[in-house]
Amino acid sequence: MPRSTRQTGVILCLVATAGSIACSSDKSTSPSILDIVPGTPASWGLVGTNSPTYVVGTDRATVHSGGTALAIAGTDTSRLRFSGVGQFVKADNYLGKRVRLSAWVRHQEVVGSDHASRRGSHRRVDHEPAD
Amino acid sequence: MHLDVVPTVGLTTNLLTEFTDSGVDGATETAFYSTRSKIPANLDFESR
């Protein structure tokens, strides 16, 4: 990759596609769509498709170690839509450094096995192109 | 969820081999991020 670009921002996301429930949890009980309180937590925002086929919110019943988990449930089988929660962070503190995003992610009843059926966390780095 | 600075040794999990054009011009992207925080917030997912 060219080194003449400048990092401008980092996006942290928990996303899901194609009929799944995903939450940041490793609890042994199964996550349920009934436990999801729709809406994004403070400092987080909706990313991807704002579609009625997805519910994005928080779950206080199935959590890892804290009191709340991010949660996504959907019945959408389209390859063209995904939904999740994320936040955008200025990259100043991470310029020239390697960063690691780590999270507990639990999923249930994910349909399909190809790239269109995914759930998990990811980080994206945006660059300002060199002109 | 954690975002940590780690040593620049060993393998990475980066799946991309080259930059992908987001379709957004650099000035717009820079302006967008200029109002954002320098540190992640609320990684323990407390609700509003």
Image (spheres, helix red, strand yellow):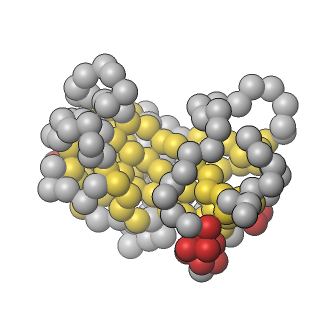
- Quarter where residue B13 is shown: top right
Q: x and y percent of residue B35 in the render?
A: 60, 80
Residue projecting furthest to the top = A113
Which quadrant holds residue A113?
top left
Q: Residue at x 65, y 33 (%)?
A: B17
Residue A1, given in percent of the width and then of the height, sits at: 74, 41
Give the residue drawn at x 40%, y 65%. Answer: A45
Horizontal side of B2 relative to A103 (left or right) equals right
Residue drawn at x 55%, y 56% is A11
In this rendering, is residue A79 above or below A48? above
Q: Is residue A37 visible?
A: no
Residue at the (36%, 62%) spot, across then down: A46
Q: Give percent across and percent down for residue B34.
A: 64, 77
Q: Is residue A115 above or below residue A35?
A: above
Q: How many marks?
A: 0
Who is closer to the viewer here, B38 or A9? A9
Name which quarter of the figure residue A40 lies in: bottom left
**A74 relative to A70, above or below:** above
Quadrant of the frame with the C terminus of chain B: bottom left
Above or below, comparing residue A69 to residue A107 in the picture: below
Q: Does residue A118 appear in this view?
A: yes
Task: State the image coordinates of residue B43 (x, y, percent, origin top left).
Answer: 54, 57
Q: Is residue A16 left or right of residue B18?
A: left
